[in-house]
Image: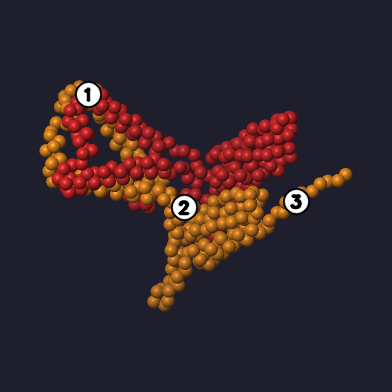
Chain colours: A red, B orange
Amino acid sequence: MSRNEGKTTQLRHRPSRVVPALILGTLLLAAGVGLAWAAVARLATGSWPAFLAGPRDWLTGLTWNDPGVWAVGAAAAILGLVLLAAALVPGSYNALRLQVPGNEGEVPAAGTQEIVMTRRAVARYAAAHCEYVDGVGSASATASARAVHLNVTTALHETRELRDRVIAEIRAQLAGAGLNPVPKITASVRSKE
Amino acid sequence: MRQHAGALNRVCLVILGILALAGGVLILLIASGMLHAMSPATVAAESPVVTGDLHAVFGTASAVAIVLVSGVVVGALGLSWILAQIPRRNAADRYRLHQDPASGTTLCDASVLASAVENQINTLPGVVGSSALLRGTAMEPDLAIKVTVNNRADIQDVLQRINTRVIPDLSMALETPLRRTGIQLEVSGRNAISGTTVETTGTVVY
């Protein structure tokens, strides 16, 4: 299992499925250690470890239509579906693409060029610029691969006009930063009073 | 900037998922008797799962060897899969800049070039910090840069300066165009190293 076979070199990529890989890797390691230890114990003492007696006795008296076999089959099928879903459900990108005017992915001295802004960076940038809008008390933002949501608090009673202004300002800022396409922007404005 | 084992994980998960799903479906088909109904040559639902004597089967030396080898193989696969999750920089070691070793060799540590790129980027207005990584070879270098900018920085200006000054300078130093560049932007509330905008507050008196 060479490390370089499946490496991801793109800065903008989908989730790497590290958690299921770590869980399964640990289970495989534990199973391997258990098997090797049992074999070594058999060679050293002349008999298999006692913990194998239970499964062996259970298997000896088992028929295919036993409820235990049904449970094992169903569990294996469900596990298989979960693993396939974990592998095939694409997940969202970790970053958004940026474009420099006049550079459509090719720079004379730079070859193929990929410029990205992480979702966290987009959220910070949007929240920071939101706080420069007149009427905004405080702001926070969350960003996905396609949308930015702003949570704004204000001292104003009428929030509709401020929300439209904040959305327009942040859209202009993100477009000015070079995000292409510009993510969809939504805002929740909460009056402090 | 670091490389992850995304493709490897997906392939392994698909293989294990298909094996588990196929095994589970096969067990359910046998347990329900449907497999026997479709093909009478297969086992019936009422038949025992283990037909032989397990004591005798696992009493042989070859069975012990098989269990030992499979344990080592499965454990090694699991361990290597876990280790593959560690994000790797996979940076270039040293670029060989010479043409003919007989007339002398010129080696350049890629980290030295990366430091020069970082220092140059850090002088740009609005930049809080940066890290650069060179991969590939001296003839086909790849550059990955992580640039952290102040949240008030002009991002397009920073990118233009990187494309028109930093990358051409590196390309000139290596005497070859870069094969591929990647720029990852982060945003921070910290002040930029140079070109800092100073915040002022005051009271307007009428």
Quarter of the rendering containing residue A139: top right
Judged by depth in the image, the label closer to the viewer, 3 or 2, is: 3
Q: Position of residue A193 (x, y in %)?
A: 72, 30
The local secondary structure at tag 1 comes to loop
Which residue is rendered at x = 29% and y = 36% of the image? Answer: B19
Q: Residue at x 33, y 34 (%)?
A: A80
Read off the chain for label 2. B
Crowding at dot 2, Cα within 10 Å, few <14 / some 14-19 / many 20+, comes out as some
Kindly indicate the quadrant of the structure image that contains residue A187: top right
Which quarter of the figure has residue B60? top left
Question: Which residue is the site of mark 2?
Answer: B2
In this view, the residue farthest toward the right is B206
- Along the line of sight, which residue is nearer the eye, B87 or B56? B56
In the drawing, what numbered circle is on residue B200?
A: 3
Q: Amino acid at mark 2?
A: Arg
Cα separation, mark 2 vs mark 1, equals 51 Å
Residue sitting nearer the eye, A116 or A82:
A82
The residue singled out by tag 1 in the image is A65
**Chain designation of label 3:** B
- SS at badge 2: loop
Q: Is residue B5 left or right of residue A132?
A: left
Above or below, B205 relative to B48: below
Which tag, 3 or 2, sits closer to the chain's start? 2
- Numbered disc 3: secondary structure: loop
| A120 relative to A35 in the view: left or right | right
Residue B55 point in image, percent of width and height = 13, 37
Subunit under mark 1: A
**Discs 1, 3: same chain:** no
